Image: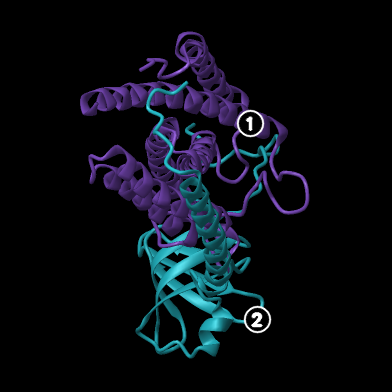
Chain colours: A purple, B cyan
């Protein structure tokens, strides 16, 4: 039995590089968000929460799409690395969905005037959060690695429907949440250039952070898989 | 290569499983399409004043109204904690009466959502007033003091 559980270059070279890049990115994004970007004409300083809120929501989308792809990969090829990627990405996705909900709530209180309201974007995001918590719980129901991976993969594929539902929920009739600013249908982003630049740096920094966390978590999961295989052999 | 690679069963088993995966994916896309289409047309967070009137919303039952704060209509009496404004959708105007300070972003000409119930006289008694803001972000004009700035 060979022991190349995870390409060494990923953990030895790329993982530390990603760590440095995401920390530098986070520092730059913080400085830009707090010092360089102007406040909003309507909302004032509190609008700066956007630079945490939007990248968090973006990571939630990204993480759950990766869970979907890894789930398809597992069902297609039965290579355990796909299951490791799926669980790693789902955990990170739940974390950042939670962050998006919390930062959104903190943003909503001084602007909308409420911490929470049963509005389409908020409901669908809460549903997405609960479904992926359920996905993680489901994974602990079976000790058989193959069975667990297959069951999880089915949920991982179905649950990705949450992503377009959450994203499009603001375009439904009579929502409270504002429409997409950057990815809006027809026309340039409706945002000041410095705000947009700050937002983009934030999204890039969060994405690097995601890649770092994913790599670290996948390598732990691969070691765990190898240990279980050895015990069962 | 990967250590935990499972020994392949027969090649026909793999083909069958992959067919199943493709079928499941197609099914998921179909369900997703229908769900998105129907959710979009049936999910209503609030009614406009005109819709509320058309549905004959009974006084006393809980309702959520959304519309624009009519310019010139916003009044807040701090001692009585009495908030009043006209909510309009361009067709129907409703007098909204609330208690307590309005959210900082509640502006004349901007959007608002109110939760509460109609009084018998047709005015709306709001338990909660929510300000709605748009997706446009711009810095304040040079002379303008942005809100929420501590002096």
Q: Which residue lies furthest to the right in this view?
A: A187
A136 vs B59, nearest the viewer = A136
Is the residue marked by circle 1 packed among few (<14), some (14-19), or many (20+) residues within 10 Å? some
Disc 1, SS: helix
- Pinpoint residue A32: horizontal percent, then vertical percent: 59, 23
Q: Residue at left 28%, top 48%?
A: A138
Quadrant hosting residue A200: top right
Q: Is residue A209 left or right of residue B37?
A: left
At x 40%, y 51%, the residue is A155
Given residues A103 and A209, the one toward you in this image is: A209
Does residue B37 sit above or below A210 in this rendering?
below
Q: Can residue A112 be seen in this view?
A: no
Residue B110 can be seen in this image: yes
In front here: A55 or B51?
A55
Which residue was labeled with disc 2? Answer: B91
Which of the labelled discs sits on residue A200, or is there none? Answer: 1
For numbered disc 2, what is the local secondary structure?
Answer: loop
Within-10-Å neighbours for mark 2: few <14, some 14–19, many 20+: few
Give the CA separation, mark 1 to mark 2: 41 Å
Instruction: Pick whichever, A95 or A36, lies toward us.
Output: A95
Q: Which residue is drawn at 70% across and 38% down?
A: B141
Percent coordinates x, y for residue A114 in the rendering: 40, 54
Query: Which chain is indicated by disc 1?
Result: A
Q: Quadrant of residue B80?
A: bottom left
């Amino acid at each position: 039995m060979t022991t190349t559980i995870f390409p060494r270059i990923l953990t030895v070279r790329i993982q530390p590089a990603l760590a440095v890049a995401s920390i530098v990115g986070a520092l730059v994004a913080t400085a830009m968000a707090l010092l360089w970007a102007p406040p909003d004409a309507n909302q004032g300083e509190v609008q700066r929460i956007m630079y945490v809120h939007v990248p968090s929501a973006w990571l939630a989308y990204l993480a759950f799409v990766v869970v979907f792809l890894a789930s398809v990969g597992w069902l297609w090829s039965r290579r355990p690395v796909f299951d490791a990627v799926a669980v790693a990405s789902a955990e990170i996705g739940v974390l950042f969905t939670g962050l998006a909900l919390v930062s959104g709530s903190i943003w909503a209180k001084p602007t909308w005037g409420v911490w929470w309201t049963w509005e389409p974007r908020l409901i669908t995001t809460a549903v997405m959060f609960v479904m992926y918590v359920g996905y993680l719980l489901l994974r602990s129901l079976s000790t058989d690695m193959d069975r667990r991976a297959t069951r999880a993969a089915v949920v991982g594929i179905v649950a990705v429907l949450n992503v377009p539902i959450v994203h499009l929920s603001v375009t439904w009739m009579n929502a409270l949440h504002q429409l997409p600013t950057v990815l809006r249908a027809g026309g340039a982003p409706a945002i000041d250039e410095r705000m947009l630049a700050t937002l983009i740096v934030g999204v890039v920094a969060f994405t690097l952070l995601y890649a770092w966390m994913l790599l670290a978590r996948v390598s732990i999961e691969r070691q765990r898989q190898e240990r279980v295989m050895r015990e069962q052999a | 290569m990967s250590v935990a690679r499972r020994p392949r069963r027969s090649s026909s088993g793999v083909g069958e499983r992959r067919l199943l995966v493709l079928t499941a994916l197609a099914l998921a896309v179909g369900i997703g399409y229908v769900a998105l289409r129907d959710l979009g047309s049936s999910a209503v967070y609030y009614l406009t004043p005109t819709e509320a009137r058309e549905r004959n919303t009974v006084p006393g039952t809980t309702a959520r109204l959304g519309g624009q704060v009519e310019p010139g209509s916003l009044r807040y009496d701090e001692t009585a904690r009495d908030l009043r404004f006209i909510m309009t959708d361009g067709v129907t105007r409703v007098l909204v009466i609330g208690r307590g300070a309005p959210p900082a972003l509640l502006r004349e000409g901007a959007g608002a959502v109110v939760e509460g119930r109609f009084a018998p006289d047709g005015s709306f008694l709001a338990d909660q007033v929510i300000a709605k803001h748009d997706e446009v972000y711009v810095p304040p004009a040079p002379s303008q003091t942005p809100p929420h700035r501590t002096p």
